[in-house]
Image (cartoon, rainbow, N blue to C red):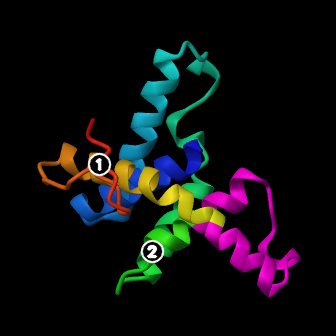
């Protein structure tokens, strides 16, 4: 899901530049250029009009979870967004089942985060958190 992937990119950018506004502007530039390469008519849109609501929600999760645990919560958010679900509509058992389903997003989410960090010179391994090598 593009909103979650770009939200993860926003986390990595904000960790690198340590300034939320600069990271948000950088992500908008990346999205704008991607739209341009896809042939989207950008004359009617400005970069500032690109909504980053979901991406900022992802960043807020990271900011609230300074001690760790943000990856699982972001994957939960991804599951709810992918299926257009409202977590308040489910009982505790159903929410546990959705949490198990969201665990399937962890490797992909980590890959986006690690790849983005590596662009800035970090050396994160892009392998499965569950032990399956994703490097090829």
Residue 105's disc is none
Name the outermost residue toward the top.
Answer: 39
Q: Secondary structure at mark 2?
A: helix
Q: Are marks 2 and 1 in contact (CB under 8 Å)?
A: no
Residue 119 on the magenta span: no
Residue stretch rendered in magenta on the structure: 76-100
Above or below, 40 against 6 in this view is above
Above or below, 91 against 13 in this view is below
Please name the residue that numbered disc 1 is placed on: 133
Which secondary structure class fits the magenta region best? helix
Dot 2 or dot 1, earlier in sequence:
2
Quarter in which the C terminus is drawn: top left
Q: Nearer the viewer, residue 23 or 66?
A: 66
Q: Secondary structure at mark 1?
A: loop
**Residue 28 in the image: x percent, y percent?**
45, 42
> Badge 1, how many Cα within 10 Å: few under 14, some, many 20+?
few
> Badge 2, how many Cα within 10 Å: few under 14, some, many 20+?
some
**Residue 34 in the image: x percent, y percent?**
46, 26
Question: Does residue 115 appear to the left or right of 83 in the view shown?
Answer: left
Question: Does residue 24 appear to the left or right of 131 in the view shown?
Answer: right
> Which quadrant of the structure image shows residue 97?
bottom right
**Residue 88 in the image: x percent, y percent?**
82, 78
**Residue 58 in the image: x percent, y percent?**
52, 64
Question: Does residue 37 appear to the left or right of 42 in the view shown?
Answer: left
Please name the residue that numbered disc 2 is placed on: 70
- Identified at 61% across, 16% down, the residue is 41
Above or below, 62 against 133 in this view is below
- Identified at 11% across, 49% down, the residue is 121
């Amino acid at each position: 899901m593009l909103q979650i992937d770009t939200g993860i990119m926003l986390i990595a950018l904000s960790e690198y530049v340590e300034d939320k506004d600069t990271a948000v502007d950088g992500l908008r530039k990346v999205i704008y250029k991607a739209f341009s390469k896809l042939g989207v008519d950008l004359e009617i849109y400005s970069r500032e009009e690109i909504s980053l609501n979901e991406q900022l929600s992802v960043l807020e999760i990271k900011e609230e979870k300074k001690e760790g645990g943000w990856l699982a919560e972001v994957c939960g958010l991804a599951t709810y967004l992918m299926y257009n679900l409202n977590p308040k509509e489910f009982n505790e058992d159903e929410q546990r089942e959705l949490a198990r389903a969201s665990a399937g997003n962890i490797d992909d989410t980590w890959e986006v985060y690690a790849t983005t960090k590596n662009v800035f010179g970090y050396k994160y391994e892009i392998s499965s958190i569950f032990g399956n090598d994703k490097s090829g």
